[in-house]
Image (cartoon, rainbow, N blue to C red):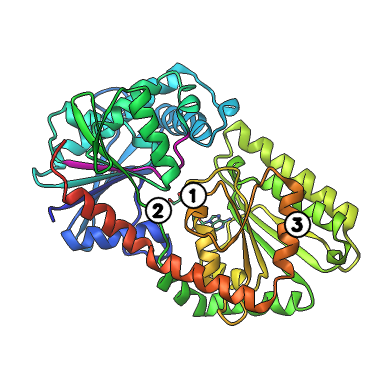
């Protein structure tokens, strides 16, 4: 294969295993070809430097045989591209939340300008037989910008978040421009079959694309292939992490503290897509409807701070604090608090211990591209005495993890019933479900994901 060029909003040192699945998977593929990883440096400079307004400095570093190229952004560009358009328009609408989107046209112009800036900085670094793999909603128009500069390399795109059905997508005033930009790629990877179907419907009904067979569509004088490549985790790495000291200590500490109680666990970014208030309400209903769980079941909800300068996230934080306080006030005892709500990131090294000590995981997003916490929970379990996964049917992971207890997170009573079923599931059923779930996450792990995507992209003729 030609040299791999990976592009994502943020770049990590691929040798840093603690950086998690994506860095590990991309790092492996990048090392195999002596590749290049390109993205934003994470640095915001207060004023524009040199050249075109907003133009940031390019930094080149080496991490083993992998080159890292990153660009600084000035404050205004960062705020409009990252907070304004990517997370103020694309994130809410792609998660079916038109009500939370702020369609300020100024943000779109800067989103375009930052993608143009990335294209200008990246193009001179490219070689003719490079294979370019661009990640996520921040960079949808990047291939179109590179093509406009004459780059003819093979280009693939992977969308880590869901793609909504056409009537929701069409709420974005510039939906045609965005979807046309996708046709500049040769291959588009989605998390789930549902997302692929939404793309196909949009392509045919709105862009009048011609289906060409083998997942291919032709429109705007280009042919693009659209397919599901559900992202996985590095199962072996997570299992190994679970055997290390920090995870073991966490497990023992949790077991010592909660040995007579049953732990339920939620681990998320504090994001409105994750269905956190609905989850707390389902837990509250569990305590109301099934009183045997009082003084016994404890929900640990870890919610990592995220995008705090976007209004919807600040509102959610207040709502969570109010709800967890209300549940604890209503049901708490001197020696038992039903909800432990922690607004912090937990260290990746402790996560497997926390998962293993928990009887039930609540992974109940209102909408999620995939959700890797669901897969991490499965990987961390003791196969002889595994916990139970309660999973939203609206997470991409639900297409693969059929042996989880699938719930509709909007249905508070139904979710409470599923939690009750999970807490009382007999050992043999827990083992049987876990065995199948583990097989599934092993068969399509993160290495499978990057291999399959790149193999498909490599095998394609230019569009
Ligand atoms: P995220 O929305 O960030 O990512 P998710 O898949 O749930 O979603 O988590 C990614 C990683 O972050 C996991 O490894 C998880 O352990 C870690 N994480 C989450 N909350 C944490 C916390 N409170 N403390 C510590 N670590 C935490 C997007 C999409 C997802 C998709 C991923 C990958 O929204 O749908 O699964 O990309 O494609």
Q: Tag 2's secondary structure?
A: loop
Q: Tag 3's secondary structure?
A: helix
Mark 1 touches mark 2? (CB < 8 Å): yes
| Residue 107, percent from left and from top | 44, 22
Tell me which corner region of the image, top left, top right, bottom left or bottom right, holds residue 190: top left
Q: Which of marks 1 and 3 is in front?
A: 3
Tell me which corner region of the image, top left, top right, bottom left or bottom right, holds residue 312: top right
Tell me if residue 157 is in the magenta stretch: yes
**Residue 250 in view (yes/no):** no
Q: Residue 396 carries which label?
A: 1
Q: Nearer the viewer, mark 3 or mark 2?
A: 3
67 or 143: nearer the eye?
143
Residue receiving disc 2: 230
On screen, residue 375 above or below 190: below
Q: Does the residue labelled 1 lie within 8 Å of ligand 1?
A: yes
Q: Which of marks 1 and 3 is nearer the N terminus?
A: 1
Q: Residue 417 carries which label?
A: 3
Q: Earlier in the sequence, mark 1 or mark 2?
A: 2
């Amino acid at each position: 294969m030609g040299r791999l060029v990976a592009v994502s909003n943020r770049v990590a040192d691929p040798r840093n295993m603690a950086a998690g699945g994506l860095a590990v998977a991309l790092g492996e593929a990048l090392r195999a070809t002596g590749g290049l990883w390109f993205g934003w440096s994470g640095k915001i400079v207060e004023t524009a430097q040199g050249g075109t307004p907003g133009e940031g400095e390019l930094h080149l570093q080496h991490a083993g045989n992998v080159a890292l190229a990153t660009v600084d952004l000035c404050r205004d560009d960062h705020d409009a591209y990252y907070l304004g358009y990517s997370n103020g328009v694309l994130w809410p609408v792609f998660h079916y939340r038109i009500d939370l989107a702020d369609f300020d046209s100024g943000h779109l112009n800067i989103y375009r300008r930052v993608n143009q800036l990335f294209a200008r900085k990246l193009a001179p670094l490219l070689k003719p037989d490079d294979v370019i793999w661009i990640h996520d909603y921040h960079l949808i128009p990047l291939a179109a910008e590179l093509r406009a500069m004459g780059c003819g390399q093979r280009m693939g795109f992977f969308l880590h978040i869901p793609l909504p059905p056409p009537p929701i997508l069409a709420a974005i005033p510039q939906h045609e421009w965005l979807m046309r930009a996708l046709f500049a790629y040769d291959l588009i990877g989605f998390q789930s079959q549902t997302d692929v179907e939404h793309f196909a419907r949009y392509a045919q009904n709105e862009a009048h694309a011609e289906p060409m067979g083998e997942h291919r569509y032709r429109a705007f004088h280009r042919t693009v292939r659209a397919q599901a490549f559900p992202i996985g985790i590095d199962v072996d790495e997570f299992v190994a992490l679970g055997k290390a000291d920090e995870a073991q200590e966490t497990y023992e500490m949790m077991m010592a503290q909660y040995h007579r109680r049953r732990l339920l666990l939620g681990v998320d970014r504090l994001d409105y897509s994750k269905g956190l208030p609905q989850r707390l309400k389902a837990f509250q209903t569990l305590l109301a409807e099934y009183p045997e769980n009082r003084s016994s079941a404890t929900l640990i909800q870890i919610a990592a701070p995220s995008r705090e300068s976007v209004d919807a996230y600040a509102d959610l934080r207040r709502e969570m604090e109010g709800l967890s306080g209300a549940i604890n006030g209503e049901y708490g005892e001197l020696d038992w608090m039903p909800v432990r709500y922690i607004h912090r990131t937990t260290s990746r090294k402790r996560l497997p211990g926390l998962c293993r000590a928990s009887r039930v995981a609540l992974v109940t997003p209102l909408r999620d591209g995939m959700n890797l916490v669901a897969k991490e929970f499965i990987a961390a379990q003791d196969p002889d005495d595994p916990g139970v996964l309660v999973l939203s049917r609206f997470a991409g992971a639900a297409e693969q993890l059929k042996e989880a207890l699938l719930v509709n997170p909007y249905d508070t009573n139904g979710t409470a019933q599923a939690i009750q079923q999970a807490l009382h599931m007999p050992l043999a059923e827990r083992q049987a479900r876990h065995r199948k779930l583990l097989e599934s996450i092993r068969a399509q792990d993160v290495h499978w994901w990057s291999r399959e995507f790149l193999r498909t992209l490599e095998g394609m003729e230019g569009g």
